[in-house]
Image: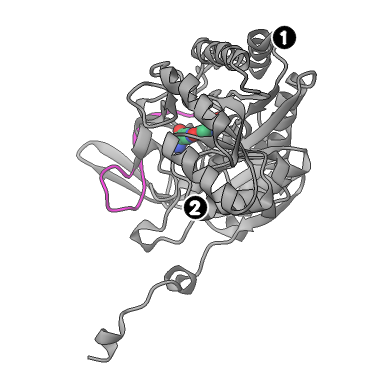
């Protein structure tokens, strides 16, 4: 469900023509729909309405201030993985007590920032990190509320090996069998208060079964810890529910996800924390790009776009599929022929799709990459000294540029040649 559709033959985001937006803002540009973002958050929040629940939006999926502020206004919390994301969440209006700090390598400065701000919880991923957290908290005369992220040894749950995190070989979390001993350490350690247990087994998960397995282990652990006198008050079930990228994709629904969470929790009296990213932002965004050239060579057709792997790296990094549709609606029954959709970057992996059946496309026309709202702009770079991709947020018939394209001067502002060169 999203708010991108053809109106009078032109792809629109809500009431805004993407042809007009492309002309006014330029390309490539990510375009987000306020209505879709709101809808996704609300569907999830409604599904958990009767549960004591904090929906901590995973900022890494789409950290644009406009997007995070839109969700914050609806009451969303934030799951952050760096001091930068923490500052973004605060700047976007997320109250500190709705922020969860995840991530495998929090620095002292990041821990200090979190404690200073009074965040809801630190998700700790190792014993050395626990000791660092305790040390910094004691120095600041504070107590850090924390959960261990437990690696439940549920293998290969993610949509792609690169985004599965719950297996024994993955770097994330403490090992399942270490948990009781580590919580005992935390219970006795001044400066930390073990209040929760967390898991996150991967991303783009279509089926609920691996999540059930992981959550069930968490609930059993909570009961075990309580028996040992550790006062666990919260469980964090992580993020991970997938979204459809292809028409044939059919992930289990948020309603089923919520029903399963309720069932697994049973009568366990806890606050439930969720960290959804993709589910909220994924199909709330598209990337619009203009065709620079159509090149025929060796029997292949290369459609060369002005967006490259630096703007949308998911296909190059995870062989991810994005539907690509023309901004001007093709005639019904238009013929389709296989083309390679590629970018301008000097890398062979700068290819978005191979042998993709597409209607006739010509230089100067616009196409849109669908379902690009999550892990699109946040993973973009300036490789090849290409300006960081712009972002626009649409609401109704209006849009705002929520990240402008940098100028060349912006792009090199942090660099300089050393004095010995000019002085030499
Ligand atoms: N919580 C933690 C601790 C995470 O590591 C992640 C994602 C999330 C929550 C949010 O997961 P989601 O609900 O979005 O699945 N760049 C990859 C995805 C990487 C996911 C990293 N962690 C992609 O483009 O597919």
Q: In this rendered view, identify the residue nearer to me: 82 or 423.
A: 82
In the depicted view, which residue is nearer to us: 122 or 154? Answer: 122
Q: Residue at x 54, y 31 (%)?
A: 186
Quarter holding residue 327: top right
Percent coordinates x, y for residue 344 in the rendering: 34, 53
- In percent of width and height, residue 214 lies at 51, 15
Query: How many neighbours does mark 2 have within 10 angstroms: few (below 14), some (14-19), or many (20 or more)?
Result: some
- Check mark 1 vs ligand 1: CB closer than 8 Å? yes or no: no
- Considering the numbered disc 1 on the image, is that residue within a helix, a strand or a loop? loop
**Is 136 situated above or below 387?**
above
Q: Is 338 contained in the magenta span?
A: yes
- Most distant residue in the bottom direction: 423
Q: Where is residue 120, by image quadrant? A: top right
In this rendering, the label closer to the viewer, 2 or 1: 2
Among the 4 quarters of the image, the one containing residue 222: top right
* Residue labelled with disc 1: 267
**Quadrant housing the N terminus:** top right
- Residue 74: x and y, percent? 77, 38
Q: Which residues are magenta?
A: 334-350
Secondary structure mostly taken by the magenta-highlighted segment of the chain: loop
Q: Report the side of 62 relative to 311 (left or right).
A: right
Q: Residue at x 46, y 22 (%)?
A: 181
> Which tag, 2 or 1, sits closer to the chain's start?
2
- The relative height of residue 359 versus residue 383 in the rendered view (above or below) is above
Q: Residue at x 69, y 35 (%)?
A: 36
* Residue annotated with mark 2: 108
Q: Is residue 371 visible?
A: no
Report the colour scheme. Answer: one colour
Q: Position of residue 300 (x, y in %)?
A: 26, 37
Above or below, 60 against 84 in this view is above
């Amino acid at each position: 469900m999203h708010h991108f559709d053809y109106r009078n033959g032109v792809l629109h985001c809500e009431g805004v023509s993407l042809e007009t937006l492309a002309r006014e803002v330029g390309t490539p540009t990510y375009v987000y729909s306020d209505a879709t973002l709101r809808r996704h958050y609300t569907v999830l929040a409604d599904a958990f309405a009767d549960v004591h629940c904090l929906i901590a939006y995973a900022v890494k999926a789409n950290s644009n201030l406009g997007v995070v502020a839109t969700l914050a206004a609806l009451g969303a919390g934030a799951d952050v993985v760096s001091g930068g994301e923490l500052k973004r969440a605060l700047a976007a209006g997320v109250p500190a007590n709705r922020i969860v700090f995840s991530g495998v390598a929090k620095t002292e400065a990041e821990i200090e920032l979190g404690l200073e701000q009074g965040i809801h919880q630190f998700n700790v991923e190792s014993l050395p990190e626990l000791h660092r957290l305790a040390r910094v908290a004691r120095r600041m005369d504070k107590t850090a509320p924390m959960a261990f992220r437990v690696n439940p040894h549920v293998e290969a749950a993610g949509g792609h090996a690169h985004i599965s995190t719950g297996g024994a070989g993955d770097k994330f979390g403490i090992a399942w069998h270490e948990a009781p001993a580590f919580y005992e350490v935390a219970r006795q350690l001044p400066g930390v208060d073990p209040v929760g247990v967390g898991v996150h087994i991967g991303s783009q998960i279509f089926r609920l079964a691996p999540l059930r397995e992981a959550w069930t282990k968490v609930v059993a652990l909570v009961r075990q810890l309580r028996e040992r006198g550790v006062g666990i008050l919260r469980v964090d079930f992580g993020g991970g529910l997938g979204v459809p990228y292809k028409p044939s994709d059919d992930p289990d629904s948020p309603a089923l996800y919520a029903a399963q969470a309720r069932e697994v929790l049973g009568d366990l009296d806890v606050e439930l924390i969720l960290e959804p990213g993709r589910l909220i932002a994924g199909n709330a965004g598209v990337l619009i790009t203009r065709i620079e050239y159509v090149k025929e060579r060796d029997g292949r057709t290369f459609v060369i776009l002005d967006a490259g792997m630096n703007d949308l790296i998911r296909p190059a990094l995870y062989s991810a599929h994005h539907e690509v549709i023309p901004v001007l609606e093709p005639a019904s029954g238009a013929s389709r022929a296989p083309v390679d959709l590629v970018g301008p970057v000097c890398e062979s992996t700068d290819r978005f799709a191979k042998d993709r059946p597409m209607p006739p496309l010509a230089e100067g026309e616009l196409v849109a990459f669908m379902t690009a709202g999550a892990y699109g702009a946040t993973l973009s770079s300036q490789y090849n000294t290409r300006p960081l991709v712009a972002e626009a947020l649409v609401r109704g018939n209006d849009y705002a540029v929520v990240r402008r394209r940098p100028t060349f001067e912006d792009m090199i502002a942090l660099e300089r040649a050393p004095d010995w060169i000019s002085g030499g």
